Image (cartoon, rainbow, N blue to C red):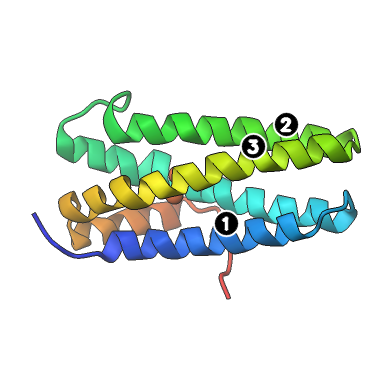
Amino acid sequence: MNHTTIISEFMEREHVYLDQLWDAFLDEKKNTGKMRALFQTFKEYILWHMKLEDEFLFPWLNNHLGLDAEEGLAALARRDHQGIVKLMELLELASADEDPEKIELESLNLDKILKAHREREREIHYHVCDNFIEPEEWRKILENINALSLNKWPKKD
Ligand SMILES: [Fe+2]
Ligand SMILES: [Fe+2]
């Protein structure tokens, strides 16, 4: 067992960046082209972040813990992620309908699940990753996802 915080620090920076994108969207209240563009930026990044978690980091963790993909922390995160994807779809529908009340409602719903989900990953998932995944393995995970990244890893200024 190691005691680095290399993974939780990296993933926390990801969450901080996601929060910035999400807050920029929330600040733009009206259903304008700018709001839709801000949402697309957020959506693209969170899909990327969830891919890193669902296809690389958490399966690797499950492997260490001797669990199937459908069990444990990986399954818990995947369920949350599916909820997030569903709520993003509903928000996009509300935006397409140009319905301000629905946009407000779906934004609040999404905000709640995002906060709860990030909190759980911060409190549980990332710490367990720190404890069970060696820094060398983590470097390999990042290499793997970079190789598959389709040049998608967005720039974080
Ligand atoms: Fe997640
Ligand atoms: Fe996350």
Query: On the image, numbered disc 3 is attached to which residue?
Result: 109
Q: What amino acid type is highlighted by mark number 2?
A: Leu
Side of 52 relative to 108 (left or right): left
Query: On the image, numbered disc 2 is attached to which residue?
Result: 90
In percent of width and height, residue 47 lies at 56, 45
- Mark sitting earlier along the chain (1/3): 3
Q: Which of pointers 3 and 2 indicates the residue nearer the eye?
A: 3
Mark 3 and mark 2: Cα distance apart in space: 10 Å
SS class, disc 2: helix
Q: Which of pointers 1 and 3 indicates the residue nearer the eye?
A: 3
On the image, which quarter does residue 83 sit in?
Answer: top right
Ligand 1 placement by image quarter: top left
Q: Which of pointers 1 and 2 indicates the residue nearer the eye?
A: 2
SS class, disc 3: helix
Give 19 or 46, whichever is nearer the viewer: 19
In percent of width and height, residue 154 lies at 58, 63
Query: On the image, numbered disc 1 is attached to which residue?
Result: 152
Task: Determine crowd level at label 2: few under 14, some 14-19, many 20+ residues with C-alpha closer than 10 A.
Answer: some
Q: Are marks 3 and 2 in contact (CB under 8 Å)?
A: yes
Q: What amino acid type is highlighted by mark number 1?
A: Lys
Task: Determine crowd level at label 1: few under 14, some 14-19, many 20+ residues with C-alpha closer than 10 A.
Answer: few
On the image, which quarter does residue 105 sit in?
Answer: top right
**Residue at left offset 66%, top offset 59%:** 23
